[in-house]
Amino acid sequence: MKIHIKSNFVVPGLEDRESVDIDRSSMTLRQFLEELSTMSSTPIEYIRAGAKKLNPDDWEIDINDVPCDEHHEGLETLLKDGDTVTLKIVVFGGG
């Protein structure tokens, strides 16, 4: 299964790639984020263990340009071959 990735940062482990091939026929967004974390030499915690939702202070994640939290299943949304997952680090300004 091929999942396309967009982000506002360089995703560790995918420095020069815009998609990732996963040797599975189906997986949830949660499973994908866990798999993506293992591709980096320094794992990134995209979701906290046992979390039911994303921490909005850390990440915004969309599936095919629709925010994860707007999908009825949230992190348990099944991804399909060719889906695009967008990862954005939330940046807070201040002065």
Image (cartoon, helix red, strand yellow):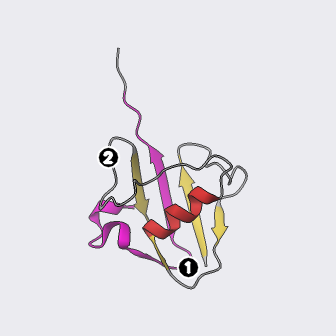
Badge 1 amino acid:
Asp
**Residue corresponding to mark 2:** 56
| Total residue callouts | 2
Q: Which residues are magenta?
A: 65-92
Residue count near mark 1 (Cα–Cα under 10 Å), binned few <14, some 14–19, many ≥20: some
Badge 2 amino acid:
Pro
Residue 18, x across and y down, in percent:
65, 59
Residue 45, x across and y down, in percent:
49, 50
Is 54 in front, or is 88?
54
Q: Name the residue at 50% across, 61% down.
A: 33
Q: Quadrant of the C terminus?
A: top left
**Residue corresponding to mark 1:** 81
SS type, badge 2 = loop
Is 91 in front, or is 34?
34
Which comes before the other along the chain, label 1 or label 2?
2
Image marks 1 and 2: residues in contact by CB distance under 8 Å: no
Residue count near mark 2 (Cα–Cα under 10 Å), binned few <14, some 14–19, many ≥20: few
Is 39 in front, or is 77?
39
Q: Name the residue at 32% across, 67% down.
A: 74
Q: Name the residue at 37% across, 30% down.
A: 92
Residue most extreme to the top: 95
Q: Is residue 52 left or right of residue 22?
A: left
Q: Is residue 51 left or right of residue 37?
A: left
Residue 69, x across and y down, in percent:
29, 61
SS type, badge 1 = loop
Q: Quadrant of residue 28?
A: bottom left
Q: Quadrant of residue 54?
A: bottom left
